[in-house]
Amino acid sequence: MFRDLLIVGGAIVIHAITHKLRMEPLAVSKINIFIQIALVAAVLGQPALHLEAPVLVQALIVMVALTTFLSGVAYVVTWLRRLAQWERER
């Protein structure tokens, strides 16, 4: 949730300052979403398939947390670079 607010907030700030907004998902965000879906599938699939895979679920939880953090950092870096580029072009 915080990462999403960070992304939207950053986009609003960039647009307010530069009056230009170019959005595209970053690779780390796509990986994050894939791992989130895998986590949901693992959690929901265990009872349906009568399996127990606590190590897999725990690993996916850690991976989701890590890629969420990395994605947030990547967006902040992207926004800062865009602001710096806008400053140079002004």
Image (spheres, rainbow, N blue to C red):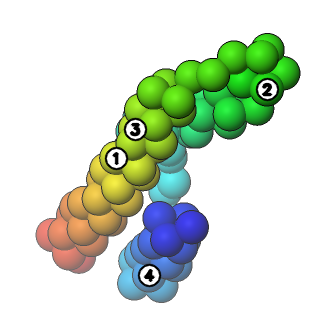
Amino acid at pointer 3: Met
As drawn, the label of residue 66 is: 1
Compare marks 3 and 4 and give the one earlier in the sequence: 4
Amino acid at pointer 4: Val
Compare marks 1 and 2 and give the one earlier in the sequence: 2
Q: Residues within 10 Å of mark 4 (few under 14, many from 20)?
A: some
Residue 76 versus residue 63: which sits nearer the camera? 63
Label 1 near label 3: C-beta < 8 Å? yes
Compare marks 2 and 4 and give the one earlier in the sequence: 4
Cα–Cα gap, marks 2 and 4? 44 Å
Relative to 30, residue 24 above or below: below
| Residue 19 in view here | no
Cα–Cα gap, marks 1 and 2? 26 Å
The mark lying in front, picked from 4 and 1, is 1
- Which residue is at 79% across, 26% downward? 47
The mark lying in front, picked from 1 and 2, is 2
Q: Quadrant of residue 41?
A: top right
